[in-house]
Image (cartoon, rainbow, N blue to C red):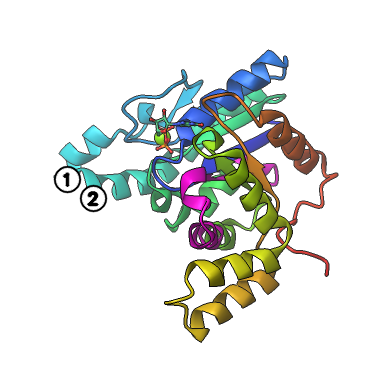
Amino acid sequence: MRGGIFVTGPAGTGKSTFCGALNSWLTEQQIDSAIVNLDPGAEYFPYSPDLDVRDFVSLQNVMREYSLGPNGAQVVAADLILDHVQEIREGLDDLQDHYVIFDTPGQVELFSFRQGSPILVDSLAGDRGMICFLSDSVVASSPSGFISQKMLFGSVFFRFFKPMIFVLNKTDLITREQLENVVRWEQDPDILYESFAEEKQKMVKDFYLEMVRSFRDSGLITQIFPTSARDMEGFEDIYSQASLIFSGGDDSDTMFRDD
Ligand SMILES: Nc1nc2c(ncn2[C@@H]2O[C@H](COP(=O)(O)OP(=O)(O)O)[C@@H](O)[C@H]2O)c(=O)[nH]1
Ligand SMILES: [Mg+2]
């Protein structure tokens, strides 16, 4: 594959919709792309997957076979995917020139915090994998929400150590002014720090301010990529970044500032 784009993020941030929208955008630009569903519990997708993990592991079967409820079965099913890596890889054989978009389970922990997931990503994409972390614009438009999303982004990065981008999805649900604020926080962490102190002034203790300060200084605040999967906006920038990463031209560890 030309590149494997793994889409993760909290439940309901629009991962599946984003996968479908990115695939449609690439197709419109006549760029070869495909979608792989890695969610054994998916009931509906806003796209037709080219490869579907449910052909190998399905939540219904796992519930029956292991006598588990849906939550326990989700965890077992996520782990069982690893037993089928070879078959999934064979399914990808014909997609040499394609960008392959991987949709991952609804809950972020089922993909990002299971033991086998970094192995799965490496087995499927090798050194041609990247992670798109999706955050919900409404959540991220308050300073504390933005910080919590960036922390989760950092946490996912520490699981995979792959090139990773922070996508601010559903921008159609926030105002232009809110979006400009979020962009400003990303560009100048000092403004974020001040906005946070202002938002939580009554409850902020030194401990939390210290955390935000070290977070600011860590360099984990990286460029954001605003998108609206509903309005098909922002995909050109996602594609440009992905192609930079996969062509090796990117300073792909933009997670780390030089200064
Ligand atoms: N307004 C808006 N809604 C969106 C957008 N992307 C997804 N959604 C909606 O968010 C909900 C969850 O989307 P889904 O793709 O299933 O999220 P997932 O659980 O992360 O895969 C659905 O109702 C989508 O229609 C977007 O860009 N804008
Ligand atoms: Mg989904």
Q: Is mark 2 within 8 Å of ligand 2?
A: no
**Depth order, front residue of 194/31:** 194
Residue marked by disc 2: 72
Q: Which residue is drawn at 80% across and 40% down?
A: 244
Which image quadrant: the C terminus? bottom right
- Mark 1: which secondary structure? loop
Assess whether residue 35 is covered by the magenta stretch. Answer: no
The image quadrant that residue 177 belongs to is top right
The image quadrant that residue 2 belongs to is top right
Q: Residue at x 58, y 43 (%)?
A: 168
- Residue 21: x and y in percent read 56, 24
Q: Are marks 2 and 1 in contact (CB under 8 Å)?
A: yes
Residue marked by disc 1: 69
- Residue 54: x and y in percent read 36, 29
Q: How many numbered marks have been drawn onto this rendered protein structure? A: 2
Q: Residue at x 69, y 42 (%)?
A: 128
Q: Does residue 31 appear to the left or right of 35 in the view shown?
A: right
Q: Magenta segment, which residues?
A: 124-152
**Depth order, front residue of 152/64:** 152
**Depth order, front residue of 191/242:** 191
Q: Residue 153 carries which label?
A: none
- Mark 2: which secondary structure? helix
Q: Does residue 24 appear to the left or right of 253 in the view shown?
A: left
How far apart are the alpha carbons under marks 2 and 1? Answer: 6 Å
Which image quadrant: the N terminus? top right
Q: In which quarter of the image is ligand 2?
A: top left
- Looking at the rendered structure, the kind of residue marked 2 is Gly
- Residue 133: x and y in percent read 56, 47
Q: Which residue is drawn at 54% across and 39% down?
A: 169
Q: Can residue 214 be seen in this view?
A: yes
Instruction: Using a 10 Å C-alpha cutoff, classify the residue at mark 1 as few (fewer than 14 neighbours), some (14 to 19) or many (20 or more).
Output: few
Instruction: Using a 10 Å C-alpha cutoff, classify the residue at mark 2 as few (fewer than 14 neighbours), some (14 to 19) or many (20 or more).
Output: some
